[in-house]
Image: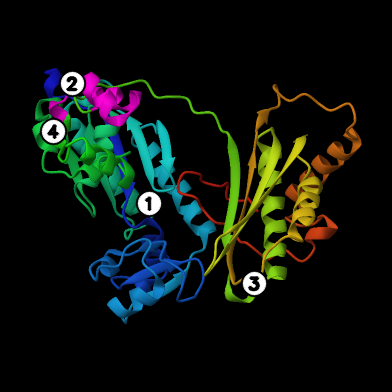
Amino acid sequence: MDSSELVRWLYLDMNSFFASVEQEMNPKLRNKPVAVVPVLADNTSCIAVSYEGKAFGIKTGTRVFEAKKLCPKMQFVIGDHKNYIRYHNQIIEAVERCVPVEAVCSIDEIACILSGSQQNTLVAIALAKKIKETIRNQVGKYLTCSIGLGPNRYLAKIAADMQKPNGLTIIRPKDLPNILFSLKLRDLPGVGAKMEERLNRRGIYTIKQICSLSDENLHQAWGSIVGSEMHLLLQGKDLPSKKSEQKSMSQSHVLPPELRNPEGALKTLKKLITKASLRLRNKNFWASCIHFYVKFLHQESWQAKEVVFETQDTSLFIQALNKHWINLPHGQIYAVGIVLSGLRTEEEHIPSLFNDHRKERLTKMIDRINEKFGKDTLHYGATHETADIAPLRIAFTRIPEEDEA
């Protein structure tokens, strides 16, 4: 086979995933402008928009009150993230029936390595079409995806973005670099507003200019080794993936109107602590710092942090929150969050000689009872009012388990 014709990666990107799931579940929403929102409030933002809504210029991040002006018939749906996880898992299963999944990149993006004859252009295209058909038949006909085929994962992702919705684009080694010249700098994954500004200051405005630069010049333009990697990736080189180490765990929540007060914010933070601590224990991590923050509508955010001896203890984190909460300023609250940092694995963890290890065993026993008999069967007294607060939310780079609290 001619190596200039071969593709090694298949990248799948679900189209308007959250909104498409809502349309798949509810026939009344099909073929209509739909926006998924965290709460029904005009000052919140759309977290997903159907393509019927995007036709009016509405996109992810558009404020609800602005979306209503652009499209008075827009239908707003509060996202139920458990459904998105369920459909995500079904999509993974559908893809696995066609080709092994190499990496789950986000809630709506999947990367697969092609091997043997699959790298042949015609075979790869047929495989991509089979994946689309399998998702449509086995998961839902209103769930479309765009698929990119390329010599490396980076270019396959770019290809997936080039034709939406329901696209299929191939970038072969022999197509490079000309096929990229019609794209904008911001179309390159990893090039955001700040990096674009940095490149512009160095006289770089087009991808054609980037492709003409040497390894050394791109390293200097990026200010890091990422520039050198970009030089290779845009030539079609397939670089080994980097193993990332988890450094923190975070939970955040935009408050519904009835909880936008100090009492509601405190209850929500306690629930977030409960959820994050359980994740910590499930992954066998220990944290040495907890960071709290509260966002206000018309003033700067409030932040506080507490350094602790490495722990997984929910009650200890709640005690730290109560300690700092008395310093919360007055204001109109709309969102809260926590970050657990200084993570150490079970192997790295050094137990304290002063800890009561009976308490650790008790905490894990509570986890097992809740796993067997249902969430919140047993809970800490400080969280007894939080059972229905802060429902499951998805960060695009972290897909929770279906039964995660």
Label ID, residue 138:
1
The answer to which quarter of the image holds residue 28 is: bottom left
From the top left corner, tell me how far across and down residue 211 is, in percent: 15, 29
Q: Which residue does the numbered mark 4 point to in the structure image? A: 209
Is 223 situated left or right of 290 in this image? left
Q: Kindly identify the amino acid type of the residue bearing the numbered disc 1.
A: Gln
Q: Residue at x 41, y 47 (%)?
A: 91
Q: Earlier in the sequence, mark 2 or mark 3?
A: 2
The answer to whether marks 4 and 3 mark residues whose Cβ atoms lie closer than 8 Å is: no
Disc number lying in front (4 or 3): 4
Is 51 situated left or right of 76 in this image? left
Give how far apart the Cα atoms at labels 2 and 3 are.
55 Å
Asked if the stretch drawn in magenta spans residue 215, the answer is: yes
Q: Earlier in the sequence, mark 4 or mark 3?
A: 4
Give how far apart the Cα atoms at labels 2 and 4 are.
10 Å
Disc 3 residue crowd, few under 14, some 14–19, many 20+, Cα 10 Å: some
Region in magenta: 211-233
Disc number lying in front (1 or 4): 4
Q: Earlier in the sequence, mark 1 or mark 4?
A: 1
The answer to whether marks 2 and 3 mark residues whose Cβ atoms lie closer than 8 Å is: no
Disc number lying in front (1 or 3): 3
Is 78 situated left or right of 33 in this image? right
Give how far apart the Cα atoms at labels 4 and 3 are.
51 Å
